[in-house]
Image: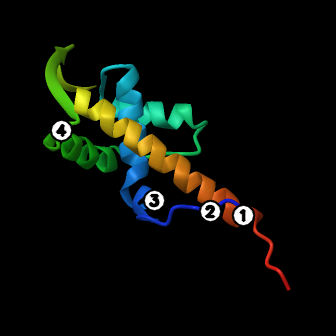
Amino acid sequence: MTKVDRKKPNAAFQNGVPLLLVLKLLSRNEMYGYEIVKSIQKASNDVLSFAEGAIYPVLHLLEKDGFITSREQSINGRTRLYYSLTESGLKRLSELETEWARVSRGVSLALQWEPQS
């Protein structure tokens, strides 16, 4: 049986999933908040759905930490904030992808586990 690293077992579940998804989307393309919400929903075949109100705190945290930047653009009289990934955001994405793979592996092992009598 494969051993699983037990370091920070709940970090990916507590706040890593939204961070991972937002960084991954922004690694592909500059996007605005509502576009991120809809892209997550579409990419997951409607399995994952975040309210706009849940995504904006994630975006603000990522920007504060220097992982993303934002710029304003006026479209049809409406101002949108477009977000893009920074170099440190790309590094953080790589770390989160590694952590997600570790946690996913642990969940898979737990689901397959058969206790011995």
- Considering only vertical position in the picture, is 115 above or below 51? below
Q: Which residue in the protein does label 3 denote?
A: 13
Q: Which residue in the protein does label 4 denote?
A: 63
Q: Which residue in the protein does label 2 denote?
A: 3
- Quick check: can you spot residue 110? yes
Q: Residues within 10 Å of mark 2 (few under 14, many from 20)?
A: few
The mark lying in front, picked from 1 and 4, is 1
- Residue type beneath disc 3: Phe
Measured Cα–Cα span from mark 3 to mark 2: 20 Å
Which of pointers 3 and 2 lies earlier in the amino acid sequence? 2
- Residue type beneath disc 2: Lys
Q: Residues within 10 Å of mark 4 (few under 14, many from 20)?
A: some
* Front residue of this view, candidates 104 and 61: 104
Measured Cα–Cα span from mark 3 to mark 1: 17 Å
Measured Cα–Cα span from mark 4 to mark 3: 21 Å
Which of pointers 1 and 2 lies earlier in the amino acid sequence? 2
Q: Which residue in the protein does label 1 denote?
A: 111
Q: Position of residue 57 (x, y in %)?
A: 24, 49
